[in-house]
Image (cartoon, grey):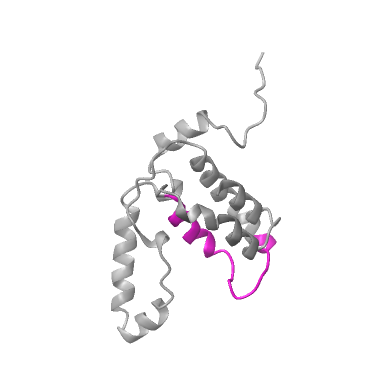
Amino acid sequence: MAASIRLLVARRITNDEFEALIAPCARSADRVIGPLEARAWTWYSDTHEHSIDRWSSTLLRPEVARWVLFLQTDVEYRWPPGPRDEFRGDFPLLHWITGGWSARRELRRLEQWERHGEIKLWPFLNRSEFDAAKRRARFLVGPRQRVA
């Protein structure tokens, strides 16, 4: 999953190639796979084959680096099911039909989900998990330099 996400964001594979690569991951018992897949799906259109655009690729790199770091750890995914775990394509129509009631309900749901942990560090739950993972990084690091 980590390698596939990196390839997608680096624009080395298309959306269709990405989906083919991660298909076996869907059978994983790892709870973070579904939410990561759902979030990555928002980066591209599934109506035609394409690479994500350069602008998105650049903006996504810090987030993707955090995801890859998470996948390289043994940290348990502890976020509750939430807005990143599912696609609700009916939002605009539903919001219009309900006069905004469903939008307010979804906003409250999102706010409650975000209070569960540090959203800027997702999929890590908190700063201590993230910092510990950075100290033990097995990926995205080069050789250590000695300081004189």
What residue is at 39 percent from the left and 45 percent from the top? 77
The mark total stands at 0
x then y, percent, for residue 7: 65, 52
The stretch in magenta equals 32-55
- Between 107 and 75, the one lying in front of the other is 75
Q: Residue furthest bottom?
A: 97
Q: Tell me: residue 42, above or below residue 116.
A: below
For this view, does 70 lie left or right of residue 11? left
Residue 93 occupies which quadrant of the picture? Answer: bottom left
For this view, does 117 lie left or right of residue 70? left
Q: Tell me: residue 145, above or below residue 23.
A: above
For this view, does 111 lie left or right of residue 62? left
On whether residue 47 falls in the magenta region, the answer is yes
Q: Residue furthest right?
A: 12
x then y, percent, for residue 17: 65, 61
x then y, percent, for residue 129: 41, 36
Q: Residue furthest top?
A: 148
On whether residue 75 falls in the magenta region, the answer is no
Residue 146 occupies which quadrant of the picture? Answer: top right
x then y, percent, for residue 133: 48, 34
- Between 25 and 56, the one lying in front of the other is 25
Quadrant, the C terminus: top right
What residue is at 53 percent from the left and 40 percent from the top? 69
- Between 30 and 54, the one lying in front of the other is 30
